[in-house]
Image (spheres, rainbow, N blue to C red):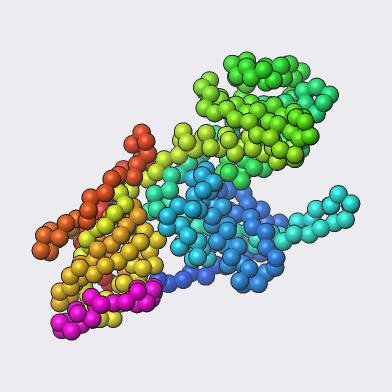
């Protein structure tokens, strides 16, 4: 390769870097029975119609929902690198369908809402979370027992299984957060637990809950408070209180739903783990097998399209290779995870960097859970790749 070509590459503009050539997989619509979101990789999104633009925007919102359920974190969609993937959410879609929901207003008039139900590819979403260092709440997930007592002014009463409609908002919110809540049967013996719920006696509630599995309880009391409602919550895991919180508001249903949010936050804080990824920072990476300026531009466009890559700076070019300084969200391990899903880069055994270039540049701190426990072993992270 001539020196002029190498010089041209070193002055590649940002516009060239946007020329991402990664192929786009088209989502397939599948018609069937009444569509519903049934697992953490399925999302339901309200739409105004079935136009393509509306559908693509809904795909992005749905993928954000799925990442929230996968991690249990309501802010998962705000994590670095996620926004770029949301813009290509269609690539993660396996199939979708529409559903018409009918509701009745307070005046008795029917209203209709169109829902788009989207199924995302589980392995691709898992890989995305691992690459970007998003903690994952492992499955199968526990189904805590909801011990909820409500006092609307006529005395507290336990919400048992036969009255599940009363607790529908908190049960549905749990599903939105990626898990489920169970209810006690509500027999006479369990109705007597209302007093323990009201005074926050978690030990007594745990004893009453021994017949249920797992040994987790979401204990709550909902009561009128001035012109609105207040809910006091306690989440218990195997006899240990993980969280206490209170919420108030004008709408009893909205206040009730906060129980599922608090329980999800407590569970994910305790059980969600990051996959083994590297520290964020600048890394020198060598790419071999480049035979023309077009190859350089194609490589740059491909890297620019990877969510794990935040910046690219050429460092050195030879006749058939280039050394790039890459700003990586989750280090070399994150780059390898994302490259493994494509047919563009082949890892090569890591070699000494040309002219003593440091690797990484500079060495950053680790991005790990507080207790340093991981869901899976560390990933081998090469710094040399061959371009196909």
Q: Is residue 101 visible?
A: yes
- Spot occupied by residue 238 in the image (x, y as percentages of width and height): 52, 23
In the picture, residue 123 is in which quadrant? bottom left
- Seen from the viewer's position, the closer of residues 247 and 369 is 247
In magenta stretch: residue 5: yes
Relative side of 343 to 257, left or right? left
- Spot occupied by residue 101 in the image (x, y as percentages of width and height): 75, 56
What residue lies at 75% left-to-right and 59% top-to-bottom? 113
In the picture, residue 97 is in which quadrant? bottom right
Q: Which residue range is magenta in the image?
A: 1-20
What residue lies at 26% left-to-right and 57% top-to-bottom? 282
What residue lies at 33% left-to-right and 64% top-to-bottom? 311
Relative side of 158 to 8, left or right? right
Instruction: Give the vertical position of 385 relative to 6 (above or below).
Output: above
- Spot occupied by residue 49 in the image (x, y as percentages of width and height): 70, 68
What residue lies at 65% left-to-right and 72% top-to-bottom? 51
Magenta portion: prevailing SS class: helix
* Residue farthest left in this picture: 355
Q: Is residue 180 visible?
A: no
- Seen from the viewer's position, the closer of residues 275 and 64 is 64
In the picture, residue 167 is in which quadrant? top right
């Amino acid at each position: 390769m001539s020196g002029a070509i190498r010089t041209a590459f070193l002055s590649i503009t940002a516009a060239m870097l946007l020329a991402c050539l990664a192929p786009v997989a088209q989502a397939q619509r599948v018609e069937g029975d009444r569509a519903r979101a049934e697992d953490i990789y399925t999302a339901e999104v309200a739409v105004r119609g079935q136009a393509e633009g509306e559908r693509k925007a809904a795909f992005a919102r749905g993928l954000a929902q799925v990442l929230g359920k996968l991690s249990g974190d309501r802010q998962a969609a705000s994590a670095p690198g996620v926004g770029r993937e949301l813009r290509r959410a269609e690539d993660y879609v396996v199939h979708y369908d529409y559903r018409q929901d009918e509701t009745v207003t307070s005046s008795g008039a029917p209203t209709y809402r169109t829902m788009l139900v989207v199924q995302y590819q589980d392995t691709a979403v898992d890989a995305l979370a691992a690459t970007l260092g998003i903690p994952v709440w492992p499955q199968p997930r526990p189904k805590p027992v909801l011990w909820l007592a409500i006092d609307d002014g006529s005395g507290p009463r336990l919400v048992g299984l036969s009255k599940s409609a009363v607790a529908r908002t908190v049960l549905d919110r749990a599903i939105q957060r990626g898990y489920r809540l169970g209810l006690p049967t509500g027999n006479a013996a369990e109705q007597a637990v209302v007093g323990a719920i009201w005074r926050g006696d978690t030990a007594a509630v745990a004893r009453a809950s021994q017949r249920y599995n797992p040994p987790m309880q979401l204990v709550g009391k909902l009561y009128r408070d001035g012109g609105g409602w207040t809910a006091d919550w306690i989440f218990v895991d195997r006899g240990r209180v993980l969280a206490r919180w209170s919420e108030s508001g004008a709408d009893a249903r909205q206040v009730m739903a906060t129980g599922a949010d608090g329980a999800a936050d407590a569970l994910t804080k305790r059980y969600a783990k990051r996959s083994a990824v590297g520290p964020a920072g600048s890394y020198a990476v060598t790419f071999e097998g480049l035979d023309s300026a077009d190859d350089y531009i194609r490589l740059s466009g491909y890297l620019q399209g990877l969510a794990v890559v935040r910046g690219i700076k050429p460092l050195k070019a030879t006749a058939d290779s280039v050394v790039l300084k890459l700003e990586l969200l989750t280090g070399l391990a994150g780059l390898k995870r994302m490259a493994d899903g494509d047919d563009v880069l082949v890892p090569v055994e890591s070699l000494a960097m040309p002219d003593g270039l440091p690797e990484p540049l500079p060495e950053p701190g680790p991005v790990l859970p507080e207790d340093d426990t991981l869901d899976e072993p560390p990933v081998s992270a090469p710094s040399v790749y061959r371009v196909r």
